[in-house]
Amino acid sequence: MKQQPKRLPDAELEVMKALWQAEEPLTRAQLEQALADNGWAGTTLLTLLSRLEDKGYVARQREGRGYRYTAVLTRREYLPVESRSALGRMFAGSARNLVAAMAETHNLTDADIDELADYLAQLKKRHHA
């Protein structure tokens, strides 16, 4: 079984997002283009890729004189890490505080509330099954 992933620093997460969005492994040049808004030097990107590879989150495959990079850690595997982190940091570990913040900032419709209630009811059934 895989070890539980740890929360990534923001820069490493940006690299992972670019890899998750790609439909195929990317070269360094393609990643630089996808991440151009960050203004990183090529060496910065290589350092980030090396760190992610050391963690087992990214794999590289030689192609010519360079490499193609692909995400080993899926977005689905990583999402709970960010969710737990945000819940702890922003909402004192309280799911109720999270929902309250959503209600205060997003003008939840009756349909949104019904959808949340249905989802919570399904979760409750699974826990008692």
Image (cartoon, helix red, strand yellow):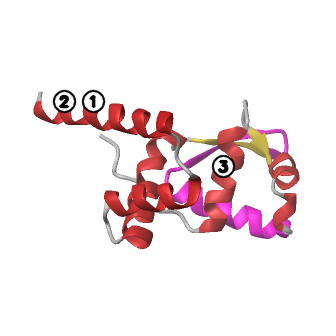
Residue 52 drawn in magenta:
yes
Say which label, 2 or 3, has the lower sequence index: 3
Residue topped by disc 1: 122
Say which quadrant the C terminus sits in. top left
Please give the label number shown on residue 33: none
**Residue at position x 49%, y 56% from top?**
102
Amino acid carrying mark 1 in the image: Gln
Is the residue under label 2 in contact with that under label 1 (CB below 8 Å)?
A: yes
Q: How far apart are the two marked residues, 2 and 3, measured between alpha carbons?
A: 33 Å
Please state the horizontal and vertical placement of residue 72, each as a whole percent of the image: 54, 41
**Residue at position x 47%, y 37% from top?**
110
Residue 72 drawn in magenta:
no
Asked which secondary structure carries label 3, the reply is helix
Q: How far apart are the two marked residues, 1 and 2, measured between alpha carbons?
A: 5 Å
Task: Give whichever of 106, 28 is nearer the camera.
Answer: 106
Would residue 99 be found to the left or right of residue 111 on screen?
Answer: left
Say which label, 3 or 1, has the lower sequence index: 3
Amino acid carrying mark 3 in the image: Lys
Is the residue under label 1 in contact with that under label 3 (CB below 8 Å)?
A: no
Please give the label number shown on residue 17: 3
Asked which secondary structure carries label 2, the reply is helix
**Residue at position x 84%, y 55% from top?**
32
Q: Is residue 32 visible?
A: yes
Task: Give whichever of 52, 74 is nearer the camera.
Answer: 74
Please state the horizontal and vertical placement of residue 43, each as a whole percent of the image: 80, 68
Please give the label number shown on residue 125: 2
Mark 2, other Cα within 10 Å: few <14 / some 14–19 / many ≥20: few
Would residue 113 be found to the left or right of residue 93 on screen?
Answer: right
Q: In the image, which residues are magenta?
A: 40-66
Mark 1, other Cα within 10 Å: few <14 / some 14–19 / many ≥20: few
